[in-house]
């Protein structure tokens, strides 16, 4: 896997679009009935401004009014989601998640640990092979690229690349969206930073990413605060490294107050794939399967696109003309994605190990 893997990934998407498949328009009624009988779906770590999840959840509830959606800890990281499964193995109450939305690097190990159960959605064949488990334990749902969100009221010049973050003009300005010891988004921000320094994806990118953030921390440029739209607007974190889709959604929500730039860095552009999975201990397994069917339907995939996320079936649906043109017109220029690197699972795992194991020693900042 190398810097040109994005071309291979795009080719896989194109291949998926060309595959013949029979797609059911709706889930079978037996599944709908069984899910409705269970009456509840418990989700976790789904902020409403992440990938348009607010509308996606609302649309699911409107489509299936007999199912209540119980939302746990919207700000949880991927590691927190998996710990919630472990901690609630024998619990069928409201704290046990039915479904999880994980960073790709965490998924294979979670399946191996026995935390997930398989289910292949009706649109399975339109999900590229390189972002799904062959047995259906997990599969890609959407992806975006790492970028900077910048408060234009406070900073006259936005950083153009990771190296710019070390400049004195960005003192007390740079933040992450999560703890790099547990958050997939933060871990991949450091990977992006490491690759911008010439590192190969994997353990090397993790080490180089830690080096940059150690320098930012020592210089006083790093702010150990969880970056969000609110902290950008308030000036607490004028620069936040996050997925482009989150930043674009925050920009829209702020509506110019303050004005916000979204900048894809010149180098180290990492594309991050997230995956969906059902807990092996889901108290409501049929509701979980129905949720998965909805997410991978045309309606669910279009819902994610409204939140600037490229859904897993993007190529197939684009080829079939299923996306409204106004949604496609709102996406960042294609050039922003042409230089993106899609790391292999093994590279993601090595990078994660380097960062989660080295953050305390190398950087030593506790993010709150």
Image (cartoon, helix red, strand yellow):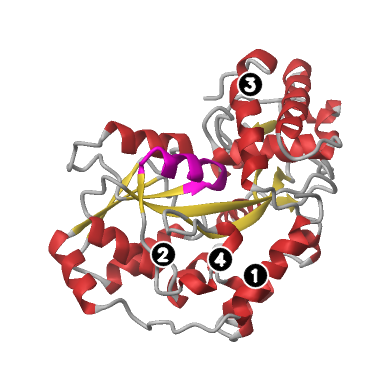
Nearer to us in this view, 56 or 207:
207
Provide residue 81's location: percent of width, then percent of height: 40, 39
Q: Quadrant of residue 340?
A: bottom right
Is any part of residue 72 visible from this angle? yes
The answer to whether 362 is drawn above or below residue 252 in the figure is: above
Sequence order check, earlier mark of 4 and 1: 1
Q: Quadrant of residue 87?
A: top left
Is any part of residue 309 visible from this angle? no
| Label 1 packing within 10 angstroms: few (<14), some (14-19), many (20+) | many
Disc 4 marks which residue? 311
Sequence order check, earlier mark of 2 and 3: 2
Nearer to us in this view, 294 or 56:
294
Q: Are marks 3 and 1 in contact (CB under 8 Å)?
A: no
Residue in the picture at 30% in, 58% down: 288
Badge 3 marks a residue whose secondary structure is: helix
Provide residue 198's location: percent of width, then percent of height: 86, 37
Badge 1 marks a residue whose secondary structure is: helix
Secondary structure, magenta segment, majority class: helix
| Label 4 packing within 10 angstroms: few (<14), some (14-19), many (20+) | many
């Amino acid at each position: 896997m190398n810097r040109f893997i994005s071309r291979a990934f795009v080719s896989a998407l194109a291949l998926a679009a060309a595959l013949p498949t029979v797609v059911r328009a709706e889930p079978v009624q037996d599944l709908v009935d069984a899910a409705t009988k269970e009456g509840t779906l418990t989700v976790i770590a789904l902020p409403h401004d992440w990938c348009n999840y607010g509308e996606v959840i609302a649309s699911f509830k409107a489509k299936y009014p007999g199912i209540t959606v119980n939302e746990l800890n919207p700000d949880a990281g991927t590691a927190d989601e998996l710990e919630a499964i472990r901690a609630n193995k024998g619990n069928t109450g409201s704290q046990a998640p039915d479904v999880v939305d994980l960073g790709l690097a965490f998924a294979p190990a979670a399946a191996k640990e026995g935390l997930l159960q398989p289910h292949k959605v009706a649109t399975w064949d339109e999900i590229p092979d390189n972002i799904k488990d062959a047995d259906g334990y997990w599969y890609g749902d959407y992806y975006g690229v790492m970028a900077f969100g910048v408060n234009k009221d406070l900073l006259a010049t936005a950083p153009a690349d990771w190296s710019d973050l070390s400049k004195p003009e960005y003192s007390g300005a740079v933040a992450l969206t999560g703890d790099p010891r547990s958050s997939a988004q933060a871990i991949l921000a450091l990977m992006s930073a490491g690759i911008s320094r010439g590192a190969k994806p994997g353990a090397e990118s993790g080490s180089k990413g830690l080096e940059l953030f150690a320098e930012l921390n020592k210089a006083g440029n790093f702010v150990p605060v969880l970056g969000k739209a609110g902290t950008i607007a308030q000036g607490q974190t004028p620069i936040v490294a996050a997925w482009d889709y989150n930043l674009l959604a925050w920009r829209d929500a702020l509506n110019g107050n303050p004005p916000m730039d979204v900048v894809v860095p010149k180098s180290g552009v990492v594309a991050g794939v997230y995956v969906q999975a059902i807990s092996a201990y889901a108290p409501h397994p049929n509701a979980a399967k129905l949720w998965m069917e909805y997410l991978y339907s045309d309606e669910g995939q279009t819902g994610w696109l409204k939140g600037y996320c490229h859904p897993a079936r993007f190529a197939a649906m684009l080829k079939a003309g299923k996306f409204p043109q106004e949604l496609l017109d709102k996406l960042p220029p294609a050039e922003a994605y042409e230089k993106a690197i899609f790391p292999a699972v093994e590279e993601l795992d090595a990078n994660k190990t380097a960062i989660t194991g080295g953050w305390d020693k190398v950087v030593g900042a506790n993010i709150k």
